[in-house]
Amino acid sequence: MPQEWATQEVIQSMEFSEAVPILKDAGEALALDSTGSTALIGGSDGALSTFSVEKQKITLKTEGDGSAINDVVAYTQGRKTLAIVAKASGEVAVLDNDKTVATFNSHAGSATGLALHPCGDILLSVGVDKSFVYYDLESMAVVSQVYTDSGKYQCAHQTLRLANIS
């Protein structure tokens, strides 16, 4: 385990601070915005809920379309936080509250995972169709789709650190 991660002793010393009421509809996916003040919760019915950490309540719940949300990420665009969802239908959608900003249907089967690049404007989605898709969020366009030998369920962008060793 990398040294910058919490040690077992640190984790064991953590104390429970407060319980948040469980949502009526089970969440399939969860993401926090960059400030940690808002949680996005994707439901098994396709509904997206916005939870205010400060107010300890749901501040917005969209209508579900029946296609489960498998993953969700919070995307900061200027001063707004948008939700990006990966759905069982294969759709990847960018949402501003209850309005759809962009919809992508690149996956032939369930879209199962999402990851934002550290630069903040490049999105990666993966799916059971054995592909991963890159999107440019500034232009809301698909950049590339690559097929592999097996279905993908999770993804992450890695930042490469280079050191000048003399």
Image (cartoon, grey):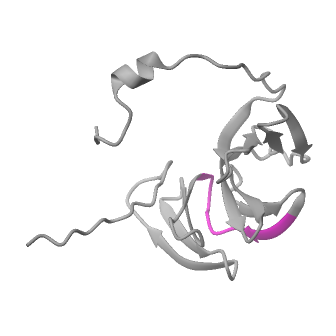
Q: Position of residue 29 (x, y in %)?
A: 66, 41
Query: In this view of the protein, which residue sits in the foreground, 133 or 32?
Result: 32
Q: Position of residue 68 (x, y in %)?
A: 74, 43
Q: Position of residue 33 (x, y in %)?
A: 68, 51
> Residue 123, located in which quarter of the rendered image?
bottom right
| Vertical arrangement, residue 22 with respect to residue 60, above or below | above
| Vertical arrangement, residue 159 with respect to residue 68, above or below | below
Q: Residue at x 70, y 19 (%)?
A: 18
| Vertical arrangement, residue 140 with respect to residue 109, above or below | below
Q: Position of residue 19 (x, y in %)?
A: 72, 19
- Could you tell me which quadrant the C terminus lies in? bottom left
Residue 162 within the magenta-colored segment of the rendering: no
| Vertical arrangement, residue 98 with respect to residue 162, above or below | above
| Number of residue marks | 0
Q: Residue at x 68, y 62 (%)?
A: 75
Q: Residue at x 60, y 73 (%)?
A: 121
Query: In this view of the protein, which residue sits in the foreground, 52 or 131?
Result: 52
In this picture, residue 35 sits left or right of residue 117: right
Q: Residue at x 89, y 48 (%)?
A: 62
In this picture, residue 80 sits left or right of residue 141: right
Q: Which residues are magenta?
A: 100-112
- Could you tell me which quadrant the N terminus lies in? top left
In this picture, residue 6 sits left or right of residue 60: left
Name, please, the residue furthest toward the left: 166
> Residue 106, located in which quarter of the rendered image?
bottom right
Residue 104 within the magenta-colored segment of the rendering: yes
